[in-house]
Image (tube, grey):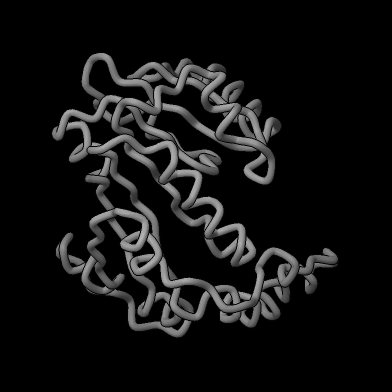
Amino acid sequence: DDFFLDAAADGVRQAVILASGLDSRPYRLRWPEGSTVYEIDQPKVIEFKTITMESIGATPTAERRAVAVDLRDDWPAALRHSGFDETEPTAWSAEGLLVYLPPEAQDRLFDNITSLSAPGSQLATEYHPDGGAAMSERAKTMGTPWRDHGFDVDFTQLFYPGERNPVAEYLTGHGWQVSTRTRPEVFAGYGREFPPTKDVAPLSTSLAVIAKRT
């Protein structure tokens, strides 16, 4: 929330939420007048959320443009077709997404974002130093509760192992000014203690990444 509101305070009036899922920010944040929020996700996800929000009478607080496209397809073309203006600065969100991408797809995602970003654009994302490897290992046990109830679930297929380019270094090399914070630092910024439990311990080394295009 703070990322988008800070970008708006800097004069950015165009936002893109990648793999938006059930993100409700287009409906609940106080966007400045003239703001447009693009949500990109698979068609069925977009359809479900749109119908659900309409059913409860929720209305967007900015101009919401849903871009129903799989990120494995030509999403930049679909985004442009929906009215995206690459000559204007953009606030990009790629949260909770990278671990579900193969390493080469992660680089391609940032390459596309960079090519679409005018000066003044900003990006919020994250980086897990152990990447998909740790998540793949955790996924082996994530399905146990489901299997105990008779569901044949295999979460290991959701994550991709392999060496990844560190996000901060990659973005810096592509013309972004980058700042990072660890998860405990993010928690401390809101006056909260990072939970010292084994369930979230792997997240203690992950970084919240904010990048600005000059």
Please state if 164 lies on the left or on the right of 169 as rendered.
right
Figure check: 146 above or below 31: below
Q: Residue at x 51, y 40 (%)?
A: 20
Residue 138 percent coordinates (x, y): 61, 79
Residue 99 percent coordinates (x, y): 56, 65
Figure check: 153 above or below 26: below
The residue closer to the viewer here, 156 or 143, is 156
Figure check: 194 above or below 67: below
Please state if 213 lies on the left or on the right of 49 as rendered.
left
Give the mark count. Answer: 0
Q: Quadrant of the C terminus?
A: top left
Q: Residue at x 23, y 15 (%)?
A: 33
Location of residue 158 by image quarter? bottom right
Q: Residue at x 26, y 66 (%)?
A: 180
Residue 184 percent coordinates (x, y): 26, 74
Residue 64 percent coordinates (x, y): 44, 20
Q: Residue at x 53, y 74 (%)?
A: 131
Please state if 98 lies on the left or on the right of 207 as rendered.
right
Location of residue 81 by image quarter? top right
Q: Quadrant of the N terminus?
A: top left
